[in-house]
């Protein structure tokens, strides 16, 4: 009996060894390294779970459904990576060791190239619905020196939990870019972030329901900050006290990115002199970039 099971183990290992060996000599060492590790780890998963053929079939059907629902504007594979924590683990593995640099988090599927430029103090809202929020801060290096001219891309969902690209009209709203001034300062009007579900009408949504997991994301505002000579930063800020901070469906929350969105009653003059007729909030986010 013991001999039979060691025969079985040898047979199984032989498959793995053959496949690993098939990637030994490619024209790219990194490709070989990644593919061999992928094969070793996937085979270990099959051995550990004693994967059945029905389960293998279910996995193929799942991936096929993910492929069918994926379009230019709906990326189910990124979503799968997000809910499995692969996106955040990749972020963690690539995070620099520079202690003071602002932490990164997931990009998500709703970033759009070519969002309009707004002036400092401008409005990214452009018809998106929600509570106005004055967002401001500085961009500095790790010595506290200002980074002028940093390009700051910002995007967020409206208070229905929808990004502009999810609306049929195709109009850009709730997104823009601006540049930090000569002292590294920036400011703009956005919306107080509200919670929303990640797209859950496809196979990833079914996976979450099967696991009894919520699709909700903690309220957040996305930033992507770039400046010559610095590492690009992709991050969000989260609303202190907001829901789902402990159960964000894509594991994106980091303590250092939680910010107070201070509440102001209707009629309180804003820092730019604007008198909002509705209640509004303000949030400060000072960004520290690491050298490239
Ligand atoms: C987002 O924050 O926009 C997002 C991130 C991951 C998956 C879905 C949405
Ligand atoms: Fe988002």
Image: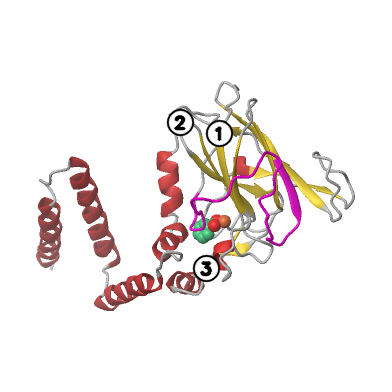
Looking at the rendered image, the quarter that the C terminus falls into is top left
Which of the two labelled residues, at mark 1 and mark 2, occupies the earlier sequence position?
Answer: 2
Above-or-below relation of 219 to 147 = below
> Which disc, if any, is residue 199?
3
Residue extent of the magenta highlight: 106-135
Q: Is mark 2 within 8 Å of ligand 1?
A: no
Q: How is the image coloured?
A: secondary structure
Looking at the rendered structure, the secondary structure element under dot 1 is: loop
Which residue occupies 61% across, 65% down?
162
**Dividing the picture into quarters, in which one does residue 30 lie?**
top left
- Nearer the viewer's eye, disc 3 or disc 1? 1
Which of the two labelled residues, at mark 2 and mark 3, occupies the earlier sequence position?
Answer: 2
Q: Label 3, label 1: how many angstroms apart (C-alpha)?
A: 32 Å
Q: Is residue 187 visible?
A: yes
Q: Is residue 51 left or right of residue 188?
A: left
Residue under pointer 2: 97
Which residue occupies 62% across, 59% down?
157
- Nearer the viewer's eye, disc 2 or disc 3? 3
Looking at the rendered structure, the secondary structure element under dot 2 is: loop
Looking at the rendered image, the quarter that the N terminus falls into is bottom left
Nearest to the observer: residue 240 or residue 223: 223
Above-or-below relation of 75 to 103 = below
Which residue occupies 10% across, 46% down?
25
Residue under pointer 1: 150
Residue 80, position as x, y percentages in the image: 42, 63
Q: Is residue 170 magenta?
A: no
Residue 185, position as x, y percentages in the image: 66, 31
Looking at the rendered structure, the secondary structure element under dot 3 is: loop
Magenta segment's dominant SS is loop
Nearest to the observer: residue 4 or residue 11: 11
């Amino acid at each position: 009996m013991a001999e039979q099971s060691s025969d079985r183990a040898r047979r199984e290992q032989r498959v793995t060894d053959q496949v690993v060996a098939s990637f030994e000599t490619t024209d790219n060492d990194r490709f070989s390294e990644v593919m061999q590790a992928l094969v070793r780890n996937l085979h270990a998963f099959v051995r550990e779970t004693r994967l059945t053929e029905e389960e293998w079939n279910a996995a193929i059907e799942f991936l096929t459904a993910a492929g069918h629902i994926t379009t230019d504007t709906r990326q189910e594979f990124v979503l799968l990576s997000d809910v499995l924590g692969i996106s955040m683990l990749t972020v963690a593995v690539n995070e620099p060791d520079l202690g003071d640099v602002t932490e990164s988090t997931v990009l998500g599927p709703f970033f759009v190239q070519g969002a309009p430029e707004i002036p400092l103090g401008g409005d990214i809202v452009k018809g998106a619905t929600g509570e106005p929020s004055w967002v401001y801060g500085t961009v500095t290096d790790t010595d506290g020196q200002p980074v002028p001219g940093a390009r700051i891309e910002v995007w967020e969902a409206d208070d229905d939990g929808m990004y502009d690209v999810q609306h049929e009209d195709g109009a850009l709203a709730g997104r823009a870019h601006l540049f930090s001034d000569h002292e590294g300062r920036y400011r703009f009007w956005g919306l107080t972030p509200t919670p929303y579900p990640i797209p859950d009408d496809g196979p990833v949504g079914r996976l979450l329901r099967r696991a009894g997991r919520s699709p909700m994301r903690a309220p957040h505002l996305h930033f992507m900050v770039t400046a010559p000579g610095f590492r690009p930063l992709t991050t969000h800020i989260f609303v202190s006290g907001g829901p789902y901070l402990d159960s964000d469906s894509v594991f994106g929350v980091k303590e250092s990115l939680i910010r107070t969105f201070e509440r102001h009653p209707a009629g309180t003059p804003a820092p730019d002199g604007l008198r909002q007729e509705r209640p509004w909030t303000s949030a400060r986010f000072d960004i520290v970039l690491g050298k490239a």
